Amino acid sequence: MPSSGPPFELRCTHEGLDALVREIRRQADGKELRKELAKNMREALKPGAAAAKSQIMGMASAGLGTGPSLRSQIAKKIRPEVKLGGRWSGARVKAFKTPGVRRFPNAPKRINRRNGGWRTLTYGHEPWRTQPGKPGWFDDSFTNDAAAYRAAVHEAMEDMARRLAARAG
């Protein structure tokens, strides 16, 4: 995982991705080709998103709340994301913020923190306490398979490049 940028992502960028996107734009059916490339790249990352969802659902729960489960709400916000062009181009698995869950929009980030956890009130009143999360649940789900996900994304990109080369040839 890169050291800069948001902490919740697995980036799979390739130096030729921008050139591939430029070539797709030159094609008559470029919009459909872009959609297909993005879909194939997202499909390549779906196993990683499923692994991260499994990790968060495996977190222990006291089950005291009456609202929606924090774990399931975080799991719903984990998905692969692909952007072709703009500020950055690439594919990543991202845990998006959870604004509607217990006024705790940074839940994925705070639960993943290796030191501490998050501070919360006891039943909505004083005293404050530190509630531990499951440190590394997101990061650890990609530790062993990051190279496989990166290779699958690169394969989707290479398939599209081969299709474009066959058209030109």
Image: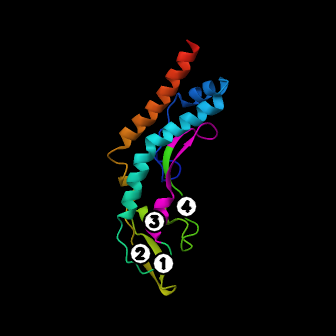
The local crowd at label 3, few if under 14, some if 14 to 19, many if 20 or more residues have their Cα within 10 Å, is few
Pointers 3 and 2 in contact (CB under 8 A)?
no
Residue type at mark 1 is Thr
Point out which mark residue 72 bears: 3
Q: Which residue is labeled 1 in the image?
A: 120
Give above or below for 44 relative to 102: above
58 with respect to 44 (left or right): left
Q: CA distance from mark 1 to mark 4?
A: 18 Å
Residue 133 sits in quarter? bottom left
60 with respect to 49 (left or right): left
Counting from the top left corner in percent of width and height, residue 25 is at 65, 28
Q: Which residue is labeled 4 in the image?
A: 97
Report the span colored magenta: 69-91
Q: Which of marks 2 and 1 precedes in the sequence?
A: 1
Q: Which of marks 2 and 4 precedes in the sequence?
A: 4
Question: Looking at the image, is mark 3 or mark 2 nearer the viewer?
Answer: 3
Kind of element beneath mark 2: strand
Q: Which of marks 1 and 3 precedes in the sequence?
A: 3
Q: Is residue 1 visible?
A: no
State the residue at coordinates (50%, 77%).
67
Pointers 1 and 2 in contact (CB under 8 A)?
yes
Question: Looking at the image, is mark 1 or mark 4 nearer the viewer?
Answer: 4
Kind of element beneath mark 4: loop
Residue type at mark 4 is Lys
Question: Looking at the image, is mark 3 or mark 1 nearer the viewer?
Answer: 3
Point out which mark residue 131 bears: 2
Residue 56 lies within the magenta run? no
